[in-house]
Amino acid sequence: MTQTTNQDVQWFIDTVLLGNIKDMICTQDQHYLGFGVVACAIEFLGACMDSHPYDQQGLSRQRFEAAVKAHFDAKYHPYADKNSKYDLYKHLRCGMAHIMRPQGKVAFTTQAESLTDGTQHLQVYATLDKLVLVSETFYADFAEACNKMKQHMAARAYTKQLTDQYLPITQIQP
């Protein structure tokens, strides 16, 4: 197993998170699948931040919330809390990771549908009492979070974690 370096993780962020996922959502219109992939990728960003092995169990919520609070705009922070009625970890990440559908208080839409329906990203749609997530906006905010993560990595804010063993990224590079 190879050791992970900042360069490997930056390649992964650039290629997979900022390249492949963007293509999935913005080019291929795979909006529904994109929500699940982004939710899992947020947890990955959180895993890069802590000092635990990547595969350590029981840290999913902690990692997801840490990534949102550290790298996403403050408008997301109220929803990165288990006490929130619209808890993104529970309703988005767990729903998509475990049963391939959002749970409870989250609704998915696209920019075009949002315009037609009169909804907005991160606003509660009162009729359904659900927090609306607009695919393209959510991805753009996620991409911004990825770039903030890369800045922290460049400043060596997360050096200890990024020397731990990880998926042999170098084996999947073209």
Image (cartoon, helix red, strand yellow):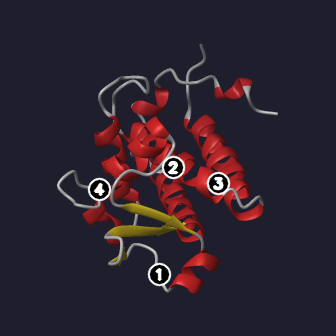
User: Which of the two marks, 2 or 3, is nearer to us in this view?
Assistant: 3
Which residue is identified by label 4? 87
Q: Residue furthest top?
A: 1
Q: Secondary structure at mark 3?
A: helix
Q: Distance from label 1 to label 3 (Cα)?
A: 26 Å
| Image coords of residue 27 (percent x, y) | 77, 62
22 w.r.t. 161: above or below: below
63 w.r.t. 143: above or below: above
Which residue is identified by label 2? 154
- Decide which of 85, 45 is in the foreground and name it: 85
Amino acid type at image mark 1? Thr
Q: Distance from label 2 to label 3 (Cα)?
A: 17 Å
Q: Dot 2: within a 10 Å radius of its alpha carbon, few (fewer than 14), some, or many (20 or more) residues? A: some
| Image coords of residue 74 (percent x, y) | 32, 70
User: Which of the two marks, 2 or 1, is nearer to us in this view?
Assistant: 1
Instruction: Tell whether label 4 touches label 3 (CB within 8 Å).
Output: no
Q: Secondary structure at mark 1?
A: loop
Labels 4 and 2: the sequence-earlier one: 4
Q: Distance from label 4 to label 1 (Cα)?
A: 19 Å
Which residue is identified by label 3? 18
Which residue is identified by label 1? 119
Residue at 38% over, 50% down: 103
Left or right: residue 20 versus residue 162 is right
